[in-house]
Image (tube, coloured by chain):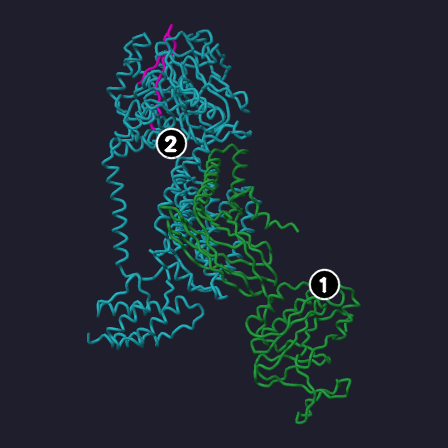
Amino acid sequence: MFSFRRFFWRSKFFPRKISFSREGKVFVLISLGLGFAAINTGNNLIYLVFSLSLAMIVLSGILSEWNLRKLRPFVGAVTRAEAMKECFVEVGIKNERKRLPAFSVQVRLLFEEDDVHVRPMRVLEVRAGQRVNGSCVLKFSKRGVFNLFGVAITTDFPFSFFSKSVVFPASGKVLVHPRIKDDISSVVGYLPDGEEVTVSNRSGRGTEIFGLRDFRVGDNPRHKVYKRVLPDGKELVKEFEQEGTRAVLVLVFDIYDDKLVGKDDLEKALEDAASVCVNLVRQGVQVGVKTVSGRVELPEGKGEAQLFEILDLFSTLDFLKVQSSHVEEALSSLTFSTDRETTLFFVRPAVGVAGI
Amino acid sequence: MSFDRLHRLVSSGTAVLGISIVALSGEYELPLMVALILALAIGPQVVIGRYQNLLGKALNIFAVVSGLFFGYLAISTSNFLYYALFYAMLLSSVKGFFLFQRNDFMQFYVLSFLQCIAGAVINPGLSFGVLVIPYVVLLTLCLLMSNVRKWVEETADASVSKVRNERDIVAWLESKSLLPAQLLWLTAGLSISTFLVSVVFFFLFPRVGMGFFAYQQRPPVSVPGFAETVELGAMTNALEDTQVVMRVKAVGGDLEPPIRMRGQSLDYYDGQKWSKTTSTVWPLRTDQQNRFLVDPREPLDGREKTVEVYLEPVSGSKHLLFAPQTPVAFEPPPNDLRALRPEKWRFYRDESGDVVVTGPPNVALVYYAHYDEHKGMSPLFLTASLRRDYLQLPEGLSSDIIALAREIAEDRKDPEEVASRLVRFFHSRFKYSLHSRHHENDPLADFLLRNREGHCEYFASGMVVMLRALGIPARLVTGFYGGDRNEYGGYVALRKSDAHSWVEVFVVGKGFVPFDPTPPGFIQSRLGKGLFGGLSKAIDAIRLFWYRWVVEYSLDKQMDFLLGLAMPSRKKGGFDEPRITIGEIRQVFRKAKDLPWVQVLALLLATPLVLWTAMKVFRGRKRIFRLRKFVTLPEVATYRSALEVVAKRTGLRRAPHETQLEFAKRVASFYPKAEQPLLALTWLYLASVFGGDTKKAESEDLKKILDEIKEAFRNI
C-alpha cells in the first residue's frame, strides 16, 4: 500500500527532505501575503519587508544545507524489541568538518513500517571533528518484523522554519515481540477439560497450575478432577506446580473469521499467551507452543534460548482466515492430546456476539 | 548573563524596535505609545513562576474579548488598519508578560513582525529605514536563540521520565554556557547577509502589477505663503522651521547658495492679506524636445541655464512649480513608461506667468526648470485691466504711507530708479526681525511708520504698496531664497525657513523685474556649523536617497538602473542618476572625510562606556524589589556553598575532568571527617539536577548537612 511517509523518505529525486514547522508555515503565509500586498499596492516599503522575509527564507535554506554537510551517523545494533515498550538504540553523529560546528541536529532511524514511533537523538552542537553519542528511542505499536531502511540526520537550524533532512541508507531488521504483561493473574486459560485456570507469576509456591495425572494413592481426594475420567475409568487428579518439573504446551488460537473471532481478539489472546509463556519459562517450566491450525509447533523447552524461540515465533505468527464453522469447532473443543506430563494451556480469544 | 535572561532581553529589544517604527509615524498618541513601549521593555524581563496554565488561559480570553471589542470599533468607524494595529500592539504588550515556552516567544515575534509590516504602510520616512536594520539583527538573534530554547524543551520532553522535567529546563536555561559562542558570531554574519540579500531582492525583483504604475505617496509638507490667499504675517511660523521643502541641483554646473526660487505672484492686497486675481490659465505647449514652454512665442535659444528640482510632496492636486528667475520652460524627467501611468502631469500657466502642474496629490515632484536670468517675468506688456490690478491699493490706505513714498522717490519717474531708492531706504532704516508685533488693524502702516521691524513679507508688502502709490505697477512674489549646500548629496536644500517674499516691478520693455527690499544678512544657516550641521546634512542626503531609491522606486527607475548597468556609457544627470561610478564612490569617501569624525568616534566610544558604568552602579545598589524571580534549586545552592567552604578552608577545587563524586572522594581522602556529609550532599545535588522525580530534600536537612561540613573543616 502506498505510504506517503515511505515515499518522502526514500525518494532519491529529492536528496534533501524538507518539512515545514508550524512557525515556518505561518512565516511563509505571511511572506506570501506580503508579496501579494506589495504587488497590488505598489508600496515599496511593504516590498522591502517582503524582501527581508524572502531573504530569511533563502538564507535559512542555505544555512541548513551547510549545517548538514559532512555529518555522518552511526547506529548500534538492535535486533529485538517488545511492542509498546521503549527500546533504546545507541546512535552517534560525527562532524567531519575541520573548523565549523553543526548546530541543532537530530539523528532518527527510519523504518518501512508506520507502526513505530521514533524519538530521535538531539544534539545542540557538534564541534568540528567531534563525535557525539547518544540514544534513539523506539516504540513499536505492534509485534512483527520491522525493516530499517535508513538513518536521517535532521536539522531545523537556524530559524526552525523547516526541518531539512539527509537520509543515509541503512538496513536491518527488528523483530518485535508481543507485549508482555507483568501481571498475568487476569489471564484465563483452559485445561483440556475446559476448566478455567490462571497462572501465577510466582514460582515454586505450590499455587494452582494446570497439570493432570492419574490419581494415586495418597493424593488429596479434593484435587480429583470429577469432570473428566479417562476411558479406562481411571481418575485424574490435578497436579500442582513444583519448580523445574512441569511442562506446559500453550495452545495459540490463530484462525479467525471476522464474525466470531476477529484479528484484534487474536492479537490480545496472543499477548496473553506470550505473557504466560514468558512467565512460565522464567519460573523454570518447560514450555512449548502449538497453534490451533496446526501450522506451527514448538516442542517444550526451557531457558533463555527457548524464551527467545517462543517470542520470535509469536512475533512472526500470522493469522489465518477460515470459515466460521472451523472457528466454532476450534472454540468448542480441544482436539490436541498431549502426554500426561505436559499440560495443555489454551488461551481462548474473546468471542463475538454469537459466540460460544 | 544566563541564556534565559539574554533571550528575554533581546526579545524585548526586538519588540521595542518594532513598535517604535509605528510610534514614529505619529498615527497614535505619544503617551499611549510610551506606555506600550515601556510594557514591552519590562514585560519579558518578568518571569512568572506559578499558575502559568491559568494565566495562559486568562490571556486567551483577554485576546478574544479585546479582539471582539476592537473589531467592533473598526467596523463602526471603518478605520480597520488603525484598530487592527492597535489590537496587535496591545496584545504584544500583554503577551510580553507571559513568555513561558518557546511557542510564546514565537507568537511574540509574529506580533512584532506584523507591527513592522504595518509600520511600512504608515511610516514611509527615513526612521523606518533606520529602525528596520537593527530590527533585522535582533530578530535574527531572537530566532536563533529560540531555536536553542526549542532544543532545550524537546530534549526535556524526551527524557526518560514521563513527566515533563521542568527542573531540567530551568537548569539549562539558567546556564551561562548554553549558547555556543560561535552562534553569536553567526548571528552577526547572518544579519548582514539577510540585509544584503534583501537589498538584492528589492532592487532586482521585477516591478509588475498596476500598483507600481501609481505614484508613491508620502505625507505632504505644508508651507504657508503659497496658497492663493496669503495673510500678512502667515509665514512667520514657517520661517523658523528647518524642514526641507525642495532640493535643487544645477545641470552642467555647480550651484552655490543663496539661490532664489520663484513661486507665485500675488496682486491684490486688502490691507490684511494678499490674493491672486489672475484666474485665467492655459496649458503649456511642448517643443520638439518635450519641454513645456512658458511662452511659446519665445523658444529656447541655448543661453538658458537648467536646474533640477526635487520638490517634497505638497497637499492638494495643484502644485506650484518653483524656478529661478526667469523660467522659460519646464521639463519632467524622461520616462518611457509615462504613458502607462494612470495619472498624467499637466502644466498650466496664468497671466502673471506663474506655472502650476496638476497631478496626483501627496507625490514628490522632480522636474527640470530652464531659466534665463537676463529676461524679465511676463507679462511683458500690460493690458488696461492688468495695469489696474498691479496698481490696486487697499481701501483706507494711510496718507502717511503715500507721503513717505513720495518723499523717498523725490519725483523720480523711472521705475527701476524708484525701486532702487526704496530698496536702499528699507535696507538703511529698517531692521529685520522674525518676532516683531504689529497693530492688528493696519499692520503695514504700523510697520512702515512706527515699528520699522519685521520680516520679508512686511518689507515686500510695504514696497509694493509704496510703488503702487507712486503709480508704478508692482506685485508681491513668494518663493524661497537662501539654502544650504549639501556636499553629500551635491544639491542645495531649501527649507521652510528659507521661504521669502520680494517684489517684482513692471518696467516697460523688460517685463517684471525683481527687487528685494529685505535687508541683507537675514539669511543664516539654521543648521549651524560643526557636528550638528554636518550630521544634519548627511541625514538629509540619506533621506533623499531613501525617498528616491526605496520609497519611490518604480519600474522605470528599475529599467534605468538595469540599463545603466548594462550600458555604462548611458548617462543621465541630476537626481535620477542610476549609474554609480568609481569616481562617485571616491567622492563619497572624500566627503566622508569631512565629517567631524573625532566627535563621532568620541560619541560612539563614550556611549557604551557610560552605559556600562551605569549598569555597574545600578547593580551595586540594593534593589527594593526584584523584577525577576529566579528559580533556585536549594540542593544546588547548598552544594555551591559547600564547595566554597571547601575551597576556602582547604584550597581544593574540582578539576574540569573530575565528576562531583570523584571530587567528594578526593576531599574525603584528605579530610575523612567531611566524607559522610559531603558525599550525602553530592548525591542530593546529583539527584536534584539529574534525578528526575527524586524526592527533594528538606531545607532543614540541607542546612544540617552544610553545618556538618563546616564543622569538619572548622579547625583546619
* Residue located 54% across and 61% down the image: A79
Nearer to the camera, B314 or B299: B299
Amino acid type at circle 2 is Arg
* Residue A348 position (above or below residue A26): below
* Residue located 39% across and 66% down the image: B689
Rendered-image quadrant of the C terminus of chain B: bottom left
Q: Chain of mark 2?
A: B
Nearer to the camera, A265 or A164: A265
Image mark for residue A320:
1
Farthest residue to the top: give it: B509
Eye-nearest disc, 2 or 1: 1
Residue B83 visible at all: no
- Chain ID, green in image: A
Tag 2's secondary structure?
Answer: helix
Percent of width and height locating residue B353: 44, 14
Image mark for residue B543:
2
Amino acid type at circle 1 is Leu
Taking the magenta stretch, the answer to whether it contains residue B136 is no
Taking the magenta stretch, the answer to whether it contains residue B504 is yes
Q: Chain of mark 1?
A: A
Nearer to the camera, A198 or A210: A210
Q: CA separation, marks 2 and 1?
A: 82 Å
Farthest residue to the bottom: give it: A218
Residues behind callouts 2 and 1 on a single chain: no
- Chain ID, cyan in image: B
Position of residue B587 in the picture relative to residue B50 (left or right):
left
Q: Which of the 4 image quadrants contains residue B125? A: top left
Position of residue B493 in the picture relative to residue A320 (left or right):
left
Residue A205 visible at all: yes
Tell me where the magenta segment starts and ends, as one range.
Answer: B497-516
Position of residue A190 in the picture relative to residue B424 (left or right):
right
Tag 1's secondary structure?
Answer: strand
